[in-house]
Each structure stands twice: as structure tokens, then as C-alpha cells.
Image: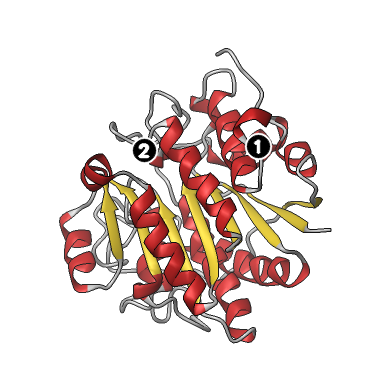
Amino acid sequence: MLSCTLVGAPVECGASQHGCLMGPDAYRTAGLKPAIEALGYDVYDLGNIEPCATQPYTHPNSTIHHLDETIGWAISLEEAAYKASQSSNLPIFLGGDHSLSIGTVPGVTRHAAELGREQFVLWLDAHPDIHTLKTTTSGNLHGTPVAYFTGQAGFEGIYPPLKHRVDPANICMMGIRSVDPAENQHLAASKIDVYDMRSIDESGVASPLHAFLERVKKANGELHVSLDVDFLEPDIAPAVGTTVPGGATFREAHLIMEMLCDSSLVTSLDLVELNPFLDERGRTAKLMVDLCASLLGRKVLDRPTRSY
């Protein structure tokens, strides 16, 4: 039987609003574990992990906040992600803000390298999160994970040394619609495939996702999916502190999950930026649980009908 490990990461130090620390327990309350078990998985919930203690860190960019705590989370999550990848078919990391990917992606990438396989990342987000410590103007470190795990300069001696970087050519971003000028420059200089909402409006999600999945399959790669609540249209997913209008629709999001399920390529998953304090009767948490279930095999006709 396939196994799934749940790792709670109540991280909110990378964001500007309080509330993401409640995210992991909101997923549990919304029925994530029984939903996955109903699909034939053995599910092991490791509870919520904690950041490790670190030395004090400083940086010339005075806007940066909670640097020590973010690094502590990165160290703990890298190790937790590595071990969860070794012990189960699908580790799922319950956030928490997107700074948790500073730890989770390097952890699963270390495991992929030991298997002799390339790591691929599907980044479903309104933001590319490709700021460096130097370029961030908000100081919110949930905007830095992609720059870090692809090995961009400027993190040395501060963030944990990368054991293995993710090749930018192995990253596909979908749903992007809020990009800072410095991030635009980084993306233009990289080989990351970026499909913003304009391109999705014009050609849909199926064609670019199919092309990316074919690349993963051809390389026999490991595929990490990082799903941010703000990838979704705020009208259907209000529980996020970084709402950007014009996100993915209910059907676009489920189609992506269904295609990922059909591919059988996903090896790890982030569910991030859920802020239950901003939710409406748990509707966003329930939607994220339903999307996860679609990724793991729930069919349209199996999905319960809900009234909000």
C-alpha cells in the first residue's frame, strides 16, 4: 500500500500577517488525513515540527525581519523533508507561509540526488518568490525560496549551505501575476518556464502542464509540487494574506491536480500560505483538501457536494 507522511510546519515568520501558524491544524480539522486514507493510502501524521535554535544573524538589508527564525525553520524542515522522503511515497508539508520551501525543497532534492534522479518543481503561485536577501524590499522571506534553492548568489554564510541545487530549467511556474522588478530581471536571466495568468487565459493550463510533465517523465525525475493558496482566485480561496485578483479558477485548479494524478510523477507536496484567521467557515481549507484529494486520485463523481 502507498504511504503518505504529513509534516506540519506552522511557519509565519516569512510573511507580514499573523495567522499562517494555524494552517497545519486547519488542514487537519478540514479532514485531510481521512480524505487521503479514503484513497487507499496509509497516512502518518508526524504532527508539527519546530524550528531549531540558531545563532543571531544580521544582513545589510534593514527591511529583513525574523531572519534567525526563518533559518531555524529551514534547517529543521530540510532534515524533516529528507527523512519523510526516505520513509514514505509522498510527504506532504502543511504550512505555514511559503518560506517553508527554503527547507522542504532542498530536503527532497537531497533525497532525489541520492537516488540519482533530477529534482523538478511545479510552482503554483501568484508570485515567483525569486527575491534574494539583497533585492527584497518588503523583508518578507517567503519571497526568497526559489532564488535560494536554485543557487542564486547572496545567501552564502546566512541560509544553510545547499547540498544540491535545483536546476532552474527544471522549474515550471504557473499562475504568476504579481512580480517585482528585481524578480522580473531574475526570471529573464533564468531558464525557468513561467506561465502567467495572461498565457493561461490565452491557452489554458493543460498544454503547458502536459509539456512539463513529459519532460519530468523523460528525465525519470522526482516532482515536487508547491501549491500556494494565492494561486487560486480570491473569491474561492480568501484565506491568504497575499490575495491577488485574477487567479486560477476552481476547475483550472482541479484540472491541474487531476493531470498530476494521471501522470503518477508527484513525489512531494507543499500546501502553503493558508491563513485560517482570514477564512470564511473553513472554505479555503476545505478547497485545499479537495485539491490534494484530486491530486491523489479522487474523481469528480467521488467529490462531495458542498454549499458555502
Packing grade of label 1 (10 A; few <14, some 14-19, many >=20) is: many
The numbered dot on residue 27 is 1
- Residue 74 versus residue 302: which sits nearer the camera? 302
Of the 4 image quadrants, the one containing the C terminus is top right
Q: Position of residue 243 (x, y in %)?
A: 35, 34
CA gap, disc 2 and disc 1: 19 Å
The three-letter code of the residue at mark 2 reads Thr
Q: Position of residue 296 (x, y in %)?
A: 65, 48
Question: Which of the two labelled residues, at mark 2 and mark 1, occupies the earlier sequence position?
Answer: 1
In percent of the image, x 47 and y 52: which residue is there?
98
Q: Which residue has dot 2 on it? A: 242
Residue 290 vertical position relative to residue 101 in the rendered view, above or below: above
| Mark whose residue sits in front, 2 or 1 | 1
Judge from the rendering whether residue 30 lies leftward or rightward of residue 54; answer left or right: right
Packing grade of label 2 (10 A; few <14, some 14-19, many >=20) is: some
Which image quadrant for residue 232? top left
Of the 4 image quadrants, the one containing the N terminus is bottom right
In percent of the image, x 64 and y 29: which residue is there?
301
